[in-house]
Amino acid sequence: MTDTVTGTLPASEQCTITVGGMTCAACSSRVQRALETTPGVSTANVNLMTGAATVRFDPGAVSLDVLIARVRDTGYDASLPDPGATPETTLDAQDAERAAEDRSLRRKFAVSLALALLTTIVGLFPGGMSGEATGSAALLRWLQLALALPVVLWAGRHFYVRAWLAFRHHGADMNTLIAVGTGAALLFSIAMTVGGGWFASHGIAPQVYYEVVTWLIAFILLGNWLEARARTRTAGAIRALAGLRPATARVLRDGNEVDVPLAELRVGDVALVRPGEKIPADGTVLDGSSHVDESMLTGEPLPVPKAPGDAVTGATLNRAGAFRFRVDRVGRDTVLSRIIGLVQQAQASRPPIQRLADRISGVFVPVVMALAVATFVVWYDLGPEPRLVQALVSAVTVLVIACPCAMGLAVPTAVMVSTGRGAELGILIRGGEALERAEGIDTVVFDKTGTLTAGHPALATVHGGGRVLALAAAVERRSEHPIAETIVAAARERGMQLPDVAGFAVHPGKGVTATLDGRHIAVGNRALMDAERIPVGTLSAEADAQAARARTVVYVAADGALQGLLAVEDPIKRESGDAVRALQALDVQVVVLTGDSRATAEHVGRAVGADRVVAEVLPEGKLAEIRRLQAEGRVVAMVGDGLNDAPALAAADVGIAMGTGTDVAMETGAVTLMRGDPRTVVGAIALSRRTMRIIRQNLFWALIYNALGIPVAAGVLYPLLGLRLSPVLAGAAMALSSVSVVSNSLRLRSFHVA
Ligand code: ADP
Ligand code: MG
C-alpha cells in the first residue's frame, strides 16, 4: 500500500485509514477537511460508504500517528489496517464492522421503539400530557421523563456526542440538527416537569414532549439501521466475488494427493481439479483437458476449452473434465484478488459530481439552523397560543426534516452498486471519475486487432515455399506481435527447427529485422520494405490479391532481395457488427484505427459498419489521431488490448482495455473489459450513463425533499390551510428519504449488457 516517490518531488506516501462511525456526507467531509488541513498532507479522500480515508502525505512532515489523532479528534474512530491485509481480509473486517453496526442499531431502535410506545401510552392518561398541575399529572410527567432518559442517554447518545465534537471543531452536521432538535424538546419538557408547579402558578399549563423526543430518536435510528442494511447490500457484488474462491486446494505433496487450505497453496504446486470443482488459483494446465466456466470473472457465458499449456484462473468453475495444473500465482497476485482490489478502490472513489453534493451539504446545516431560529421567532411573535410551545415544536420539525442524509448517500451508493454490478459483468470501471467521463463518450476508437477482430490471426498462404516460412519464423520467434505468434506457430506445426538469430530489432508498426547466418532478414509490411529499400514489384499482383481478401501481407526479404510473402487472416469477431450498431444507436461514432494496410482495414470497417477507418498508422500516429479527435471537441474512448496500446489508452478520455479471459493488463485502462466481446464496450457506456442518471435523480430527490419539506415544517401552509407537520412525521419522512435514495441506487443491480 506504500509507494514512495523520489526525485525533485517531495517524498510522499499513501496510507489508508479505517474511519468508524461516519453516518452522513457532513461527517465524511468533516474528516476530509481535518485531514486536508493537516500540514504535510497533500491529498485526502474520505469515503462514507467504505469507511476509509486514503491519504497522501509527506512522511517527513507528518506521521501516521498524527493522522490517526486528527481523525479521532473529529469524533470518529480511526485505525490503520493491518499491513498484511489482502483485499479479502479487509473485506472480512469491513463485514464484521458492518454486522456489528447493524446489530447495535437494531438493538437501539428496538429499545427506543418500545420506550416511545410506553411514553405515548403514559401521555394518553388523562391530564398527563397537558393541563393541570395536579399531583397525578406531575407524576405521569416524571414517569415519561424516566422512560425517555434511556432513549436519549443510551440509544441516541452518539448523536449528542458527535454533535458536541463537531461543535468543538466549529462544525455542524446532521448530528447537530438531531441533537439540537431533540435536545430543545427534551430540555423544554424537563423544565416543565421539574418546575410544573411554578409554571402553573404563572398561568402556563405544563406541557411535555417526551414522546416527540423518543419517537424522533427511534425513527432516526430506524432510518440509520435501514440505511446500514441497504449499504451492506450495495457491497454485495464484491462480497460475492470474494466468496468465489474455494476454501481448499487438492495438491500433490510427496507424491500424495492432499487437501490444503488455500493459504498454504504455493507457487509451483501441482494442483488437481476434478469435474464440478472450482479452480483454486491461477496457473497453467499440465495434463488433462476440460471446459471451464469463467463467467464469474469475465461475464463470458460460454465455457472455455482448456488443454495442456492453457492458462486457468482461480475461482472459475471446472465443468466436465479433470486436469492437473501448475500454480503460477496465489494470494493477492491472483486475477481474482486484483479484481477485488480494483473494485474496492473504484467503490471508494468519488466522481466529480460528488463535489456538488458536498458543497450543498456544507452550507446546508448552518442554513437550516438559521431557518429553525427564524421559524421559532416568527411562530413566537405571530403564532397561536401557547406560543412558546408552538414555536419550539415548529423549529424542532424544521431541524429534523432537514437532515441531509439522503444527500450524502446520493452519489456513493450509486457508484458502489454500479461498479460492483459492472464487475459481475466483466466490466471493471476504475472509479467514479472514469464513470462520469464515460457517460459523455461520443466517439469510440477501436484498435482493430484483438478488439473487432479475434487478434489471433491464422496463416492463410505462403508464397515462396517452406524456406520463406522458416526464415520468417526464425526472426518472428523474438517478437510478441500476434502476427509473429501466428507465423511461429505455423512453422512449428510443420515441424520446422527455428535457428537462433542475432541483432533482432522491432520496427513498430512495420515489422522485424535480424541477422541469420550473416544475412540481413526483414519481415514486415510494405512500409518496412520501403524503409529497407527493397522493391516489392515482383510480388505486387500476389500482394494485391491477398489484400483484396482482407488478409495482411507480410513480406520476407533477405539481404535486400524479396524472397516471398505470407498472408495472415484475422477473422472478425461475431459480435463486432452488433456492437458497432449498438454504439451508433447511442449516438456514438465508431472509428477503426490500425497499423494494418488500408485494404484490410477498410474491409473490416465495412464488415462491421464503422463510421470511419484510419489505417497504416504507426503507434505514435494512434496517439496523434486520438488527440486530433479530442481537439475537435469529441469525448473519445479508445479500445485496445491494454498491452501495447497503453499510450493511446492513456491519452483517450476513457481508455478501455479489452482482454480475452484473463490476459488483460487490468491496471492500464480507465475501464477494463474482462471479456473479448466488443458488446461489453456498449455495456460500459450504457452502465455509466445509467449510473449518472441515477445519481442525478438521487440528488434531485434529496434536494426536492428538503426544499419542500423545510417550508412545510416551518409552517408556511399553516396560515392558509391550517396544515402543520408534526416532528414525529418529519422524522419518519427523513428516514424514508434516505431509504428511497439507497433503493434507487440498488436498481442498478439489475443492469444488463444489452
Ligand atoms: P495494429 O495493432 O493496429 O495491427 P501494429 O502497429 O501492431 O498495428 O502493426 C501494424 C502493422 O505492422 C501490421 O499490420 C503488420 O503489417 C506490421 N507488423 C508489425 N509487427 C510485425 C511483426 N512482428 N511481423 C510482421 N509484421 C508486423
Ligand atoms: Mg497492436
Image (cartoon, helix red, strand yellow):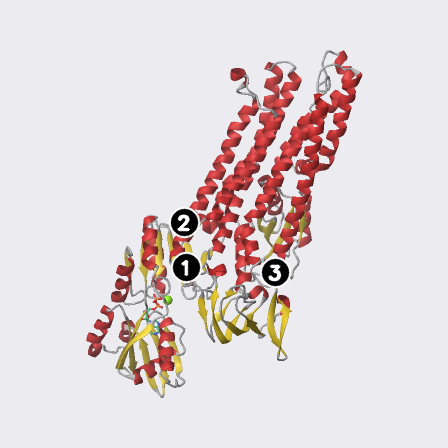
Left or right position of 524 against 72: left
Q: Residue at x 58, y 61 (%)?
A: 4
Q: Residue at x 66, y 33 (%)?
A: 217
Per the image, the residue denoted by label 3 is 86
Per the image, the residue denoted by label 1 is 649
Q: Residue at x 51, y 44 (%)?
A: 746
Ligand 2 shows up in the quarter that is bottom left
Please name the amino acid that badge 3 sits on.
Thr
Whether residue 24 is situated above or below residue 484 in the rendered picture: above
**Circle nearer the N terminus (1, 3):** 3
Per the image, the residue denoted by label 2 is 686
Q: CA distance from mark 2 to mark 1?
A: 20 Å
Please state which of residues 312 and 293 is positioned toward the viewer in this rendering: 293
Please state which of residues 26 and 681 is positioned toward the viewer in this rendering: 681
Q: Is residue 171 visible?
A: no
Q: Are marks 2 and 3 in contact (CB under 8 Å)?
A: no
Whether residue 492 is situated above or below residue 159 in the rendered picture: below
Q: Is residue 526 visible?
A: yes
Q: Name the front one of labels 2 and 3.
A: 2
Left or right position of 707 against 633: right
Residue 392: image location, x then y, percent: 64, 22
Query: Secondary structure beneath disc 1?
Result: helix
Whether residue 465 is situated above or below residue 145 in the rendered picture: below
Q: Residue furthest bottom?
A: 517
**Circle nearer the N terminus (2, 1):** 1
